[in-house]
Every structure is written in structure tokens, then in C-alpha cells.
Amino acid sequence: MSRAQAIAGVEAYFDDGRFMETMKKRVAIRTESQEPASRPILYDYLHLEMAPYLESLGFTCEVVDSPLPGGSPFLIAERMEAAASFTLLTYGHGDVVRGYDKQWRTGLSPWEIVVDGDRWYGRGTADNKAQHTINLAALEEVIKARGGKLGYNVKVILEMGEETGSPGLNAVCQAYAGRLKADVFIASDGPRVNAPTPTMFLGSRGGCNFDLTVNLRDGGHHSGNWGGLLRNPGVRLANAIACLVDGRGRIRVPSLLPDAFPQSVRNALAEVKVGGGPTDPEVDVEWGEPGMTPAERVFGWNTLEVLAFKTGNPEAPVNAIPGHASAHCQIRFVVGSDDRNFIANIRAHLDAHGYSDVGVALSGVQFAATRLDPDDEWVRWGLASMQETSGKKPTLLPNLGGSLPNDVFSETLGLPTLWVPHSYPACSQHAPNEHILASVSRESLQVMAGLFWDLAEQGTQVMARRAAA
């Protein structure tokens, strides 16, 4: 019974093809949560695929309906040991974005694994089926290596609606808070900072989407007859956006910025490099908040992005001053931002600058910003374990640049949250030709087996040090 034995177990799981066979089976299940007709398939993934597997590891399982009409289901699973001294909670999502079958490269299909060198193509490989498959397989090998006794409890929540904004997840965690009670949260989603580097992140930036609209009149009016006499909604909206964010991407509204940049976050990002991969776009060094590194701008600060802008008829423009203009915008924000008042603060700023004709409205689901303190004892423990297994210094990101429902675990359930991603930035997540890298997957199995083993050996001490701090 040893750490090396557990790691050898996951290496064999990958090398003898069992990981591939599991991924083939799970990718073939078309769990497109955006499609209403797929709802029975979402239940099948939990009832027929995940629950039987978890039960074989000693979990008791229950599929829970969404509290929202027509919502996606959840699976809650518990593996309890009588002498356990603490409890781990882990998470994953089995739903995927739409397959976009016809847009995939010739020879590829979103619903079957196709291998091309180091790349394994298939919808859900990167997001999130491979990631929770890796974690649960690593846990299985640690259970075997420890003779069936971990020394800690494990609880699992799998959702089937993450790709539609995790509707109902917070309500389910509130309703089942007693059953989901734990001491630490370890899960996987999103990409590493780059393919070769094991990565840990501690939360995520929040996301606030909003619409700006200018509605001046019904229909268009000939620009030769009315040009210079009528306000142009496109011009008004372009200038309104420019008073929110300048021509170099710097936010011009102080109330949309975080109240501080903690030194612990700055320290964690000091050696982080962003981009540079063969398929990555080139970083614009003059873009965004001046005086910050690229890592600080994407992981430690707020950005305001224009995602879509429309006025008139872009596909077939005519010589007419349009009556309407609209833009769909987004703020990505970190902990310490006044996100509850973003819309009110934008409204006040536009009014103060003479743009009372520009409407502002929240659009879609808003994600909260979360971040565990980079100096937390759990963080030090996790990074040390990852380095021992991989022989590489892992990258610590205080938070992911994107958004995920970490606030449900960090705030609603009150847990320290450690995320160890198993994908990489160029994985084509959400796009045609989504894939994982076999090399990253194999290393991730090793890293997670090491973490789950070390949790058994050191978790009680980490909790004691944390309580004493």
C-alpha cells in the first residue's frame, strides 16, 4: 500500500485502454443541455452511466430533479467511512454544448472519440467529461491501493445544466446542504495555464452581461435628405461605449473596478505567463489596464468587453440613418468589485456624460466572483502534492479568467475551493473540433491520484494548521 502504487494504478488505467473505453462510452451520450429534447438523455447519463459506476466504488446515489420547471437533473453521491476524520466534496458536469455536427473537420464527429496524434477529439472531452472521469478514476485507484479505506468521506455532486448557466445548482445545494457538508472542495474544469504546466486555481472571475440600446425612431430615414439633422443611434452608442471603456481597453468608470489588488494575488501571478502557444492569439501588450502584466490583467483585474454591436442592416447596408442601435457587453470581474450595482453605476455614468438616451439592462445569468486566499493552508498542501507527483512547479492562479459556479461551493456551502484543470487553452472548448491531449490526461490522472492519496495521509494535519492560523 503506497502512493507509488496508486499512481501506477492510474498509469495502467490509461495505458491499457480503459480510460479510452470509458471516454468513448461517455462522449457517445449526446448530453446537449441547450436542447429541450435532450432532457431524457441528461437523466440517462446520471441513471445509466454515472450512478452505477459510483455505486461500484461504494457510493450511495440519488438523482435529484431540478427545482426549476424543465430544469436539468443532478446526482448526489456519498461514500461514508465510519472512522473518517473529514470530508471531501467534488463536482463535475455531464452536459455539453451543442455538437454543431456539420462544422467539425472532415473525419471527425462530436459523438465519437477520434485520435490524431496527441489529440483525442469529441464533444465533452475537455468540458467536462474527461475531467470528472479522470478525478473519479484516480479516486478509484487510491481506494484500491489503500485496501478500500480512504480515511475520509467523499461526496459528489454532478450537474447536467452547467452549459446553460447551472440553473437550480445553488437551490439544490441549499436544500441538500446537510448531505453536502464537507471540509474541502477539489474539482476540475477549465484549462491549465498551458498544456505542459499543472495548474491550480482557487475561484473564478465573475461575469455580468448587459445590453446597451439606443431607440430613437421607427425605421430608417434617407441619409441624403436627413443626414446632419437626425441623431445617429450608431454614433450615439459608439460614443457612449467610449465613455465606459477607452480606445485601449481601460475601464473609465471607477465604480466598475475592484477596490484593491491584494499583494497575495500579485505575488501568485508574478511568474505566470499568458499565451505563447502555437495556436494562441498574440497578446496585445498595449491593451487593458496600464502598468499591469498580461496575467494581472486577465486573472487579477476587471475588463469590459463589447461582444456584439449592431445598427442598421450590416449584411446589406442602405443609405439610411437607422432608428436603432444595440450592443451586447460584458464585465469580467474579480473579488472586491461592487457587482450588485454595476448596472446602476453604468446608468449613473452615462447620465453624467450626457447619454440619457442610451438604455442599460442586465442580460442573462450573472456569475459571482470568488477566490480562496492564495496563502491558505490547503493551497500550500495542494501545490506541494502536485509538484511531488509531476516533478514540475505548478502554476497557481488566484482565480480563473472565465466564470463558473464556484460561489455555490465557496459561499453557499462555505468551503475552501481548489480547482485542478485537465484541459488546455487551445482545446476548442465549446467550438467544433473540441479535444483533449492524451499527454495531459495521463499526467492529470497521476496528479489526482497523488492528491487523493496525500489527502488521506495529510488532510487532518492541514485542517489543524488551518484552524490554528
Image: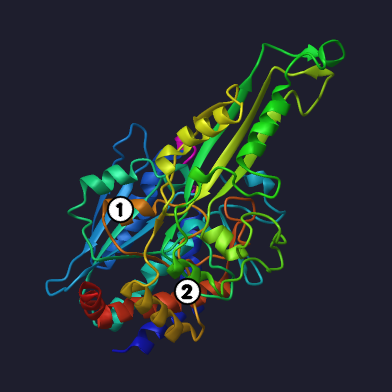
Q: Is residue 378 placed above or below 185 in the rendered structure?
A: below
The image quarter in which residue 184 lies = bottom left
Separation of marks 2 and 1 at Cα, in angstroms: 27 Å
Within-10-Å neighbours for mark 2: few <14, some 14–19, many 20+:
many
Q: Main secondary structure of the magenta part?
A: loop
The mark nearer the N terminus, 2 or 1, is: 1
Residue span colored magenta = 30-37
For this rendering, which residue is in front, 108 or 88?
A: 88
Q: Quadrant of the N terminus?
A: bottom left
Q: Quadrant of residue 428?
A: bottom right
Q: Quadrant of residue 457?
A: bottom left
Left or right of 11 on screen, residue 73: left
- The answer to whether residue 356 is above or below residue 30 is above
Q: What percent of the width, then of the height, locates residue 372? A: 37, 63
The x, y position of residue 338, in whole percent, is: 42, 45
Name the mark on residue 281. Answer: none
Q: Is residue 284 above or below residue 305?
A: below
Residue on which disc 2 sits: 444
Residue 149 visible in rendering = no
Q: Which mark is residue 411?
A: 1
Where is 405 relative to 366, above or below? below
Crowding around mark 1 (Cα neighbors within 10 Å: few <14, some 14 to 19, many 20+) is few
Return the x and y of residue 280 as percentages of the image width and height. Answer: 69, 62
User: Label 2 sits on what residue type?
Assistant: Ser
